[in-house]
Image (cartoon, rainbow, N blue to C red):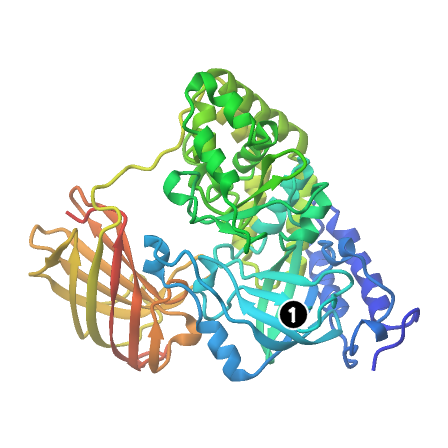
């Protein structure tokens, strides 16, 4: 068993020393490759402990404060044990892809399961464990997780932290986006979660590297606001529109459910240009929002509030009566912009950008903040630490991040300098939001070598696009590996020629651990489909396939392995095929 409190020779003391060495090297802007390799082994040694875990905090070594717990030099070791049937149930819970797109599943209650959770060698019995997330909830292979230490034991915590948010970073195989973006927001003086990396093992299965993100709850609010009793809302593809008042997820004061503060914000946004600042300023901290908006631009957080009305928290401080905004779900940050445009589709950003004086203030503040906080050596050291701590981080993507870091400041100068740039907008389509049906079957063999996939055997599809059935298509196809950001994954690919000679392509992606006989849900993370049309006005990506099942009768990734099965689902369109 572990050593008692005050012991100086226990495993945790060695871990702290090891991690201090890792942290020291991580502060170097570009350590030599041999040093990175050495530190990777040191980091592994730091987080490995052959001794039995501590039963609880009373038998653990000296205390660890939350700042140490969330330090980037600290790879948090998380081991979870629960009934295997409970784990299967947990993994498969969640919204479906079409439900996410159509907004019909905004409210979804995940079940808690009882688990034993060991964090850095400290065991916590009867903790609550559930799946979490909106888009991230779609993953079955590596679900994002919420741990509630005190669910069955009120007052229990891990050195003062009672809830852990473990994000799978499904959209970020570099394992660097979330923590780096939160640190950037914090460096600008904005309320933001603390964050570092965690190695997660469930029932002996190594799930790899997660982001350990400080939960935005009363504990976190108390660090940033003098009064933590206000309303906290989470926004997931919802804005401050009259129809969306009830769609915002209230995270505090749920039983009271008084949303009059949001209603006031919605009303303020209906004010004339002449009255906007006065009315909006009575409910939103405009100066702090301007900084938040600027930081979303600087960090390339295209999937946040200002550009997509998504992935944000809004808290109304009872002391000031004003809303402040916080980033959330930043695994899509560090976008490489292709044009000189501004994030401004969120209603608050759009209205403020429409006022010439406010537009000038925003552009000036964006460049001012960027010049202050964009420290290339510090940012690069963070990426080097990720390379040490996360062996599953894709090296090519980390190198892309380094290139982004080195060139971002000059890029921002080009975006916000000179003539005021326009708000970034997506091209509208009359077919956006169209939902159609699809089904098909296939029989072929697996070819792991060809790119693109080689034609073979029997393929049939029935589908509807643009609200009408598609007919007269001759289908061919193949099975093999298809490239994804995280690496190659098994896929079944259909190609067909439409009567007007355009090519229609359907690719069904399958999670690597799921490519085996059985019925698998089109849940939208690992297993889903894409449809594209090449040629004519409908050139390019058309939509996604989800909300159905893939039935594999035979499957395998060995050369010439039989691949046979069928599927049915629904298509959500973003553009027209015709």
Residue 277: x, y in percent? 51, 22
Q: Residue at x 52, y 80 (%)?
A: 86
Say left or right for 176 vs 467.
Answer: right
**Element assignment for label 1:** loop
Considering depth in this image, is 31 or 112 the residue closer to the camera? 112
Taking depth in this image into account, of 188 and 316 the one nearest to the observer is 316
In the image: residue 146, left or right of residue 123 = left
* Residue 229 position in % (x across, y down): 66, 47
Residue 327 shows up from this direction: yes
- Percent x, y for residue 128? 61, 71
Residue 342 seen in this snapshot: no
Quarter that holds the N terminus: bottom right
Residue 481, located in which quarter of the rendered image?
A: bottom left
Question: Where 533 sits versus 496, above or below?
Answer: above
| 192 displayed left or right of 301 | right
Q: Image height check: is 441 above or below 286?
A: below
Query: Badge 1 local density, few (<14 within 10 Å), some, or many (20+)?
Result: some
The residue depicted at 41 percent of the width and 66 percent of the height is: 526
Residue at point 8%, 60% (across, down): 471
Instruction: From the top left corner, tell me how far across and down residue 188 is, in percent.
Output: 66, 35
Marks counted in the figure total: 1
Frontmost residue, 355 versus 78: 355
Residue marked by disc 1: 151
- 475 on left or right of 146: left
Residue at image position (34%, 82%) is 518
Residue 538, quarter of picture: top left
């Amino acid at each position: 068993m572990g050593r008692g409190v005050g012991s100086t020779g226990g495993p945790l003391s060695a871990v702290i020393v090891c991690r201090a060495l890792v942290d020291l090297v991580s502060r170097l802007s570009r350590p030599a490759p041999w040093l990175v390799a050495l530190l990777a082994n040191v980091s592994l040694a730091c987080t490995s402990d052959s001794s039995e875990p501590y039963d609880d905090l009373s038998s653990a070594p000296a205390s660890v404060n939350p700042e140490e717990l969330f330090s980037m030099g600290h790879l948090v070791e998380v081991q979870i044990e629960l009934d295997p049937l409970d784990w299967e149930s947990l993994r498969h819970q969640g919204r479906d892809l079409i439900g996410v797109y159509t907004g019909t599943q905004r409210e979804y209650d995940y079940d808690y399961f009882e688990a034993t959770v060991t964090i850095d060698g400290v065991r916590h019995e009867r903790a609550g464990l559930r799946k979490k997330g909106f888009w991230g909830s779609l993953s079955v292979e590596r679900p994002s997780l919420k741990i509630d230490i005190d669910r069955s034991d009120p007052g229990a915590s891990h050195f003062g932290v009672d809830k852990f948010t473990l994000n799978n970073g499904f959209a970020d195989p570099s394992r660097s986006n979330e923590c780096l973006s939160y640190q950037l927001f914090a460096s600008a003086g904005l309320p933001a979660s603390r964050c570092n990396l965690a190695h997660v093992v469930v029932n002996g299965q190594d799930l790899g590297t997660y982001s350990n993100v400080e939960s935005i709850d009363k504990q976190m609010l108390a660090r940033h606001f003098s009064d933590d009793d206000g309303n906290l809302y989470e926004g997931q593809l919802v804005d401050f529109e009259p129809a969306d008042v009830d769609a915002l997820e209230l995270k505090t004061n749920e039983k009271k459910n008084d949303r009059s503060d949001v209603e006031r914000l919605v009303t303020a946004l209906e004010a004339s240009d002449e009255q906007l600042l006065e009315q909006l300023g009575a409910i939103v901290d405009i100066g702090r929002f301007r900084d938040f908006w600027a930081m979303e631009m600087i960090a390339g957080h295209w999937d946040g509030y200002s550009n997509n009305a998504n992935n944000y928290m809004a808290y109304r401080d009872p002391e000031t009566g004003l809303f402040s905004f916080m980033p959330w779900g930043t695994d899509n940050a560090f976008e490489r912009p292709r044009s000189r445009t501004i994030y401004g589709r969120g209603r608050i950003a759009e209205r403020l950008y429409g006022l010439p004086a406010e537009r000038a203030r925003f552009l000036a503040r964006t460049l001012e903040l960027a010049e202050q906080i964009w420290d290339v050596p510090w940012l690069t050291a963070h990426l080097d630490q990720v390379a040490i701590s996360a062996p599953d981080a894709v090296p090519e993507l980390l190198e892309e991040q380094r290139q982004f870091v080195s060139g971002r400041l000059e890029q921002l100068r080009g975006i916000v300098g000179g003539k005021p740039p326009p708000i970034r907008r997506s091209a509208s389509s009359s077919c956006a939001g169209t939902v159609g049906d699809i089904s098909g079957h296939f029989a072929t063999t697996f070819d792991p070598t060809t790119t693109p996939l080689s034609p073979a055997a029997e393929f049939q599809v029935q589908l509807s696009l643009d609200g009408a059935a598609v007919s007269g298509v001759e289908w061919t196809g193949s099975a093999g590996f298809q490239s994804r950001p995280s690496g190659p994954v098994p896929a079944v690919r259909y190609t067909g020629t439409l009567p007007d000679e355009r090519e229609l392509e359907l690719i069904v992606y399958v999670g690597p651990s799921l490519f085996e006989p059985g019925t698998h849900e089109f849940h939208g993370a690992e297993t889903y489909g894409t449809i594209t049309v090449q040629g004519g006005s409908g050139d390019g990506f058309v939509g996604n396939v989800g909300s159905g099942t893939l039935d594999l009768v035979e499957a395998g990734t060995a050369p010439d392995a039989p691949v046979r099965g069928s599927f049915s689902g629904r298509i959500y369109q973003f553009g027209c095929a015709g």
